[in-house]
Image (cartoon, helix red, strand yellow):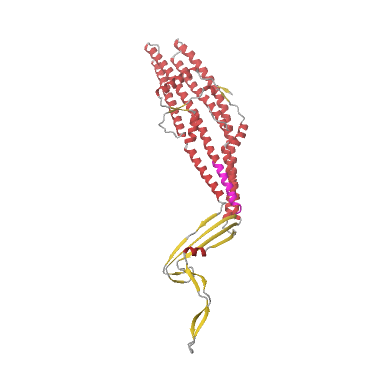
């Protein structure tokens, strides 16, 4: 565990003054807390929206795979106007005619068996959907870590801005004293030039720190998809909440936990399961496809205007005569009774139905089924390697993160000790300088050492916080300040 000092009084007072002045001069500036930055990023970031669209597409594919189990129903109406010499579709004779012929049919088909492809495709699409959901979660988590990292960078840079302003104030005091000593003849031109250089360096440090802060704020705006012209600053957390940071972790335990909840690993495992399911889908091409079908149809022709509805009683019908006697020859026949044939009656009378089973047996298909199975197996083996690679990469990253945290804690303790020593040295040197016991060079050296150690201490403190939050990220803990 590392215990941070609340903040050197000099930094605290100057920081309060600086932020009070900032609030007074820029009342329109929007203050963003870490939670607001996270919420706005999740709500507005375009990368997240892209991942959500991909997830939505996968959801539609999953639903379609389930719909494929339902029967298919289709209707096929058609109408033909014939003129000139053409076939009579009712008598199947060819003649010169003008007519209109219409027909219609409907078919119902249900796949009974297809080598398990329908069910396996549903399972595969469900795995793809789960993978895309995990991918969306990964994008959110990665952006969350980036937002927290940038937020801590902004806090570091703003503290460096405050420190740079303090250094400018000290450099101005030193320059004023050097100018008075030079005017009185108590110091050389070189001493005055050195004090002027010290002030210029402090002003350059302020410009650099401010530019770094502005750049970090711009990056935060980009994460939140905020207009770059919007004036914002970040809310400084209560420093007392950052005084007890855990710095001792067992890398093996962190890795074990990360393997169960890290989205990178979960995504790789889901993709591996997806390719395993794809093998089953591809193997379904080896099996026959059995389908049940039913159909119904009817037709109408304008050539058919009448139809037989019955017959008359037997009557004698002349068929000729005898040449010698001129006697009439008759036969007994039943004459048909006809009636007009309306389109509705034609459709009703011509109505037909059918039922059947269709079996499609794959015999030779240019080895496409074999190739599909082979490729699916290769994809699965590749996914296995990708999963192991993801685990290896995560393990190395976590081990490095634990070592970085330990190094950051040691660096902070060292920089804090250096800062306290240089602060005391500056106080002593200043007293001796005021008494005329040391020259300007010694005082400026002490001031430079103090300024550098102050910046190093600020950066080291936030490095410990950042490195600790990285471990929290891999453990799946909420990242807060």
The image position of residue 35, as x and y in percent, is 50, 30
- Read off the magenta span: 114-132
Most frequent secondary structure within the magenta stretch: helix
The image position of residue 47, as x and y in percent, is 48, 38
Residue 15 part of the magenta segment? no
Answer yes or no: is residue 225 visible: yes
**29 lies above or below 301:** above
**364 lies above or below 177:** below
Q: Residue furthest top?
A: 435
Q: Residue furthest bottom?
A: 324
Q: Residue furthest left?
A: 183
Residue situated in front as seen by the camera: 321 or 383: 321
Residue situated in front as seen by the camera: 426 or 134: 134
The image position of residue 227, as x and y in percent, is 42, 33
Quadrant housing the N terminus:
top right
Quadrant of the image occupied by residue 81: bottom left
**102 lies above or below 216:** below
* Count of residue discs: 0
Q: Residue at x 44, y 11 (%)?
A: 434
The image position of residue 281, as x and y in percent, is 59, 50
**182 lies above or below 276:** above
Residue 124 part of the magenta segment? yes
Q: Residue at x 52, y 17 (%)?
A: 421
Answer yes or no: is residue 379 visible: no
Quadrant of the image occupied by residue 210: top left
């Amino acid at each position: 565990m590392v215990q941070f000092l609340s903040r050197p009084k000099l930094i605290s007072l100057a920081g309060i003054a600086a932020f009070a002045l900032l609030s007074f001069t820029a009342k329109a500036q929007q203050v963003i807390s870490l939670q607001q930055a996270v919420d706005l990023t999740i709500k507005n970031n375009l990368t997240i929206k892209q991942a959500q669209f991909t997830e939505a597409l996968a959801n539609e594919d999953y639903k379609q795979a389930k719909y494929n189990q339902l029967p298919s129903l289709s209707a096929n109406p058609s109408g033909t106007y014939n003129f000139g010499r053409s076939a009579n579709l009712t008598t199947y004779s060819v003649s010169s005619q003008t007519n209109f012929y219409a027909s219609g049919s409907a078919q119902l088909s249900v796949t009974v068996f297809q080598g398990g492809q329908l069910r396996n495709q549903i399972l595969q699409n469900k795995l793809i959907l789960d993978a895309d959901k995990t991918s969306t979660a990964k994008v959110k988590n990665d952006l969350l870590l980036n937002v927290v990292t940038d937020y801590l960078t902004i806090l570091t840079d703003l503290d460096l801005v405050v420190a740079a302003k303090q250094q400018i104030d000290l450099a101005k005091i030193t320059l004023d004293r050097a100018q008075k000593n030079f005017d009185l003849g108590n110091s050389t031109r070189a001493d005055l030039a050195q004090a002027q250089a010290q002030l210029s360096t402090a002003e350059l440090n302020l410009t650099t720190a401010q530019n770094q802060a502005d750049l970090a704020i711009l990056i935060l705006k980009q994460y939140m998809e905020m207009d770059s012209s919007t004036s914002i600053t970040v809310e400084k957390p209560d420093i007392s909440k950052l005084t007890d940071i855990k710095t001792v972790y067992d890398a093996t335990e962190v890795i074990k936990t990360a393997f169960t909840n890290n989205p990178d690993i979960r995504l790789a495992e889901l993709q591996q399961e997806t390719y395993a399911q794809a093998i089953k889908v591809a193997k379904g091409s080896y099996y026959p496809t059995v389908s049940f079908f039913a159909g119904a149809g009817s037709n109408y022709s304008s050539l058919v205007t009448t139809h037989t509805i019955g017959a008359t009683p037997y009557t004698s019908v002349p068929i000729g005569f005898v040449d010698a006697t001129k006697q009439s020859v008759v036969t007994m026949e039943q004459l048909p009774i006809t009636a007009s044939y309306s389109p509705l009656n034609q459709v009703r009378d011509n109505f037909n139905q059918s039922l059947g089973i269709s079996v499609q047996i794959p015999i030779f298909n240019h080895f496409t089924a074999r190739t599909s199975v082979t490729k699916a197996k290769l994809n699965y083996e590749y996914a296995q390697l990708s999963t192991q690679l993801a685990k290896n990469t995560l393990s190395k990253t976590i081990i490095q993160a634990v070592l970085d945290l330990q190094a950051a804690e040691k660096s902070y303790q060292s920089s804090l000790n250096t800062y306290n020593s240089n602060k005391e040295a500056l106080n002593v040197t200043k007293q001796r300088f005021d008494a005329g016991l040391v020259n300007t060079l010694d005082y400026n050296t002490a001031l430079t050492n103090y300024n550098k150690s102050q910046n190093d201490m600020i950066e080291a403190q936030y490095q410990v916080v950042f490195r600790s939050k990285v471990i929290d990220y891999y453990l799946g803990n909420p990242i807060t300040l």
